[in-house]
Amino acid sequence: MKKYLISAVLLLFSLGVFGVRISKGVTFKQNVSGYLKRAADANTIDMANAELTKVINYLEANNLTSGYTSVMWETPDEDIGFWYQNLKASQQELETLNSDSALERTNVLMKLRETLLDTGEKTKVTIPKGLSVYPDNLFWGILTLSAFIAMMAGFIVLIPNEEKNNAEKVAGE
């Protein structure tokens, strides 16, 4: 019985950590990456600017305007400051565009799309990795690793118990 309790606690801890981590990712998508994708897909300057403004307001309100998301070393793709300044520059360009030329407006929207999206095998929004848990990336890395180990331990505790129970059932028959 004690082994079942230990296993349940380990598995519940793991599920709790993974659940909160998933929740943080969903919240980030709702407030940042989802709006960036909509800004990139916008057909008008006003629509793109409105979506980009939502993102920038969220980033500023949550102090996500500078730093690096990396835990061990700083790499350019994890530079929040550069990414944020790039978003601000794009917003400034959208706000100051005074041309009625359809070609110019289209060019600005195309430039914005190229800024916000990375294309390759699959098109995805350009965001520094790990931004959804910033500035606690080290904490979440350790917690996620601990949760994974706890989950494995929880299953390992159950396996010998189940084999013993099955052997007893077979012997009793």
Image (cartoon, rainbow, N blue to C red):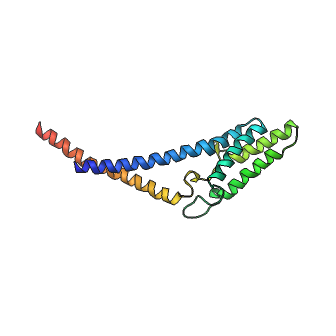
Could you tell me residue 84's position as x and y percent?
Answer: 69, 54
Residue at figure coordinates x 81%, y 38% from the top left:
106
Between 123 and 38, which is closer to the camera in this rendering?
Answer: 38
- Where on the picture, by quarter, is residue 78? bottom right
Whole-percent x, y for residue 34 in the image: 63, 41
**Res. 121 in view:** no
**Percent position of residue 102, x then y:** 85, 36
Residue furthest to the front: 61
Horizontal side of 10 relative to 161 (left or right) equals right
* 133 relative to 3 in the view: left or right: right
Q: Is residue 4 visible?
A: yes
User: Residue at point 50% right, 45% down?
Assistant: 22
Rendered view: 107 above or below 150: above
The residue drawn where x is 54% and y is 43% is: 26
User: What residue do we see at 16% from left, 39% from top?
Assistant: 169
Where's the C terminus, which quadrant? top left
Q: Nearer the viewer, residue 156 or 64?
A: 64
Residue farthest along the bottom direction in this orientation: 73
Q: Position of residue 104 (x, y in %)?
A: 85, 41
